[in-house]
Image (tube, rainbow, N blue to C red):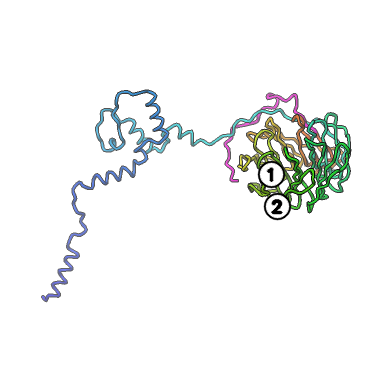
Amino acid sequence: MDQHTFRSIKRTKDMFVSDYAKRPSDGDLSRPAKLACKKMDEYASVMHLPPPAALKKKAKGAASGPGPARPSIKPTDVLEGKKTGKEPSSALALVSDTQKKQPMTKELVLRQRAPTMPKPQWHPHWKLFRVISGHTGWVRCLAVEPKNQWFVSGSADRTIKIWDLASGTLKLTLTGHISTVRGLEVSPRHPYLFSVGEDKMVRCWDLEQNKVIRHYHGHLSGVYALKLHPTLDVLFTGGRDSTVRLWDMRTKAQIHCLSGHTNTVASLETEPVDPQVISGSHDSTIRLWDIRAGRCMAQLTNHKKSVRALAKHPKEFTFVSGASDNIKQWYLPKGEFIQNLGGHTAIINSLAVNPSGVMVSGADNGSLSFWDYRTGYRFQDIETPPQPGSLDSESGIFGLAFDKSYSRLLTAEADKTIKIYKEDPDSTEETHPLDWKPNVIRKSRF
């Protein structure tokens, strides 16, 4: 056998005959490591108490005061089989609870329960009290005088009528607009009435002389919304030119032109503090404006349909917005979302809120919905009766307004009438009980 053949055979033997696959015997050195890995893998969740239970146990021990020392039992001692003075019931309970995958404390159980709607406050039901007719066109807007003696209405017949609130009789008719009157406001500090219409005009009427004393020029198309600032002599208007314009009431000068909306501005609300004006538009957005800087503070895009109605709460720092998809509540000043009020499946044209927590929504199909403002529970639905001689389709509600005592609700409707609603004196919790069950609150995606 030559030298090369011998080396080849030796290499083959070393490769295949030598026992390289045999695990080296290291005695019991690896057993503690394997046991520690197994304990961490299977029992890591019960090695320590969860924070609520640990804090509760600590507080209970502090309240009971110092006592005799008790031997502490660890889950690792139980797993390793160490003997202790007492039976390790607490540790075994922890291990068994974890193995059964059950919550270990009462706090964790309560935390996992779904939230439920709080019980709504009971409110008296409302009923129709009076119907006032006199306009020859759709009644589009309403405003109540600050002293609660009369109210004013604007219509598609291009007239503004002033009515006695107590008797419902006509006191005065103002003419001058050449198209539909879409917005009215009565100044609380001056004897002035402001009106806007689809003729692009913003007018100031002197109620001592019953004539127009100022015009505010600047809008490029019809003006649909009008609001007065609560504390300043400033006027806000919005319309089809997609802008919100600020006017100095005295000098007729335009202070700001707030642009940003991409469609008609249909509704406005004002506040004495920031945001001092809120606008809702047909572009499905709500904007909160900073009138000092003349820019938008926040844009709310939760609605998917045109925002035609806005209303603020008289006492709380919140407001509501209405569209055909939903009615939504918001916190001010940043516009945080509160909740959806669903169920009024129609185009919401107007909203009104009173201090006792009653919110009213009026729709294009002549339906009125009354809501508990805090919980969003709808406690009454009313279908407005169309007047004799009008079509069934002429039952839309275009405007809502509470009087200054919040005891009467005025509605401007498409059947050319103004209806007044009052609380039913015969309504009690027995005759009109709450049809309410504590349903689980559904989290909104918007």
**Amino acid marked by disc 2:** Ser
Disc 1 secondary structure class: strand
Would you place residue 360 above or below residue 236 in this image? above
Q: Residue furthest front?
A: 251
Please name the predominant secondary structure of the magenta segment in the image.
Answer: loop
First in sequence: mark 1 vs mark 2 = 2
Residue 370: quadrant of the picture: top right
**Amino acid marked by disc 1:** Ile
Residue 354: within the magenta? Answer: no
Question: Taking 39 as reference, is 5 left or right?
Answer: left
Residue 175: quadrant of the picture: top right
Part of the protein shown in magenta = 420-446
**Mark carried by residue 278:** 1
- Depth check, front residue: 45 or 274: 274
Q: Position of residue 195 (x, y in %)?
A: 81, 43
Q: Residue at x 63, y 41 (%)?
A: 333
Q: Residue at x 38, y 26 (%)?
A: 62
Question: Taking 79 as reference, is 300 left or right?
Answer: right
Q: Residue furthest bottom?
A: 2
Residue 425: within the magenta? Answer: yes
Q: Position of residue 41 (x, y in %)?
A: 33, 44
Question: Taking 168 as reference, is 442 left or right?
Answer: left
Disc 2 secondary structure class: strand
- Depth check, front residue: 95 or 276: 276
Q: Residue furthest left?
A: 1
Q: Position of residue 80 (x, y in %)?
A: 26, 38
Would you place residue 170 above or below residue 181 in this image? above
Categorize mark 1 by other alpha carbons within 10 Å: few (<14), some (14-19), many (20+): many
- Depth check, front residue: 219 or 38: 219
Q: Residue at x 40, y 28 (%)?
A: 59
Look at mark 2 in the image and give the residue it sits on. 259
